[in-house]
Structure formats: C-alpha cells, structure tokens
Amino acid sequence: MLVYPSGAFKQYWDYFIMVVATYNCFALPIEIAFEPPLLISPAFQAVTGLCDLIFFADMVVVFRTVVFINDKE
C-alpha cells in the first residue's frame, strides 16, 4: 500500500504522531528525572511501549509515502 502525502490518511496520521510525540516529549523526561511512582506503574510502561510501537509504525508509513519527482526542468 502506498501512502500519498496529500491524502487524508497521511494528514490524520501526522496529527496523531504529533500528539504522541508531544506526550512522549513531556512524559519521558519526567520519568527519567524524577521517577514518580505513577509513571513507573505497569500501565504507564504499557503506554510507553505502545508509543514505541506507534513510532515504529510511523517509520513504516514514512517509507511507504510517495515522493513526486519532477524531472522536466
């Protein structure tokens, strides 16, 4: 399956990745610096693992995204 950069799926996917990256941007430094008990719980570890899987899926989507090249210059 090829993903077109102007398609609706790619736009929604990019928005979703921005939300996950923003979550990761705040949660990861807090987990490393302060080690609060809430963020060390199994539920949080599951969410962190899910974020990692989502970023792996994003790599697959990016590699399957079509690039248009204009060679008529």
Image: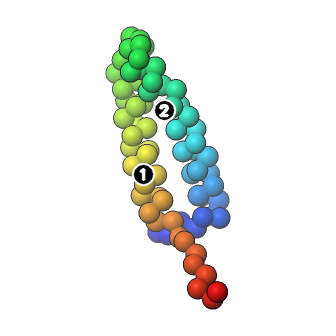
For marks 1 and 2, give the one nearer the viewer.
2
Tell me residue 15's x, y (percent).
61, 46
State the residue in front, 23 or 45: 23
Please give the name of the residue rendered at 46% of the width and 65% of the height, measured from the top-left corner.
64
- Residue 25 in percent (x, y) is at 51, 31
Of residue 62 and residue 72, the one placed in the foreground of this image is 72
Disc 1 residue crowd, few under 14, some 14–19, many 20+, Cα 10 Å: few
Q: Residue 16 appears in which quarter of the rendering?
A: top right
Residue 65 badge:
none
Q: Is residue 24 above or below residue 6?
A: above
Q: Residue tagged by mark 2?
A: 24
Above-or-below relation of 15 to 45: below
Rounded to the nearest whole Å, what is the CA distance between mark 1 and mark 2? 16 Å
Q: Which residue is mark 1?
A: 57
Provide residue 69's location: percent of width, then percent of height.
57, 78
Q: Compared to 9, does 52 lie above or below?
A: above
Q: Earlier in the sequence, mark 1 or mark 2?
A: 2
Question: What residue occupies the far bottom of the structure in this picture?
Answer: 72
How has the structure been colored for display?
rainbow
Element type at mark 2: helix
Write the residue at 52% across / 26% down. 26
In-image side of 11 versus 24 (left or right) = right
Badge 2: how crowded within 10 Å, few (<14), some, or many (20+)?
Answer: some
Q: Is residue 32 left or right of residue 23?
A: left
Residue type (three-letter) at the residue carrying disc 1: Ala
Residue name at image x 58 percent, y 67 percent: 4
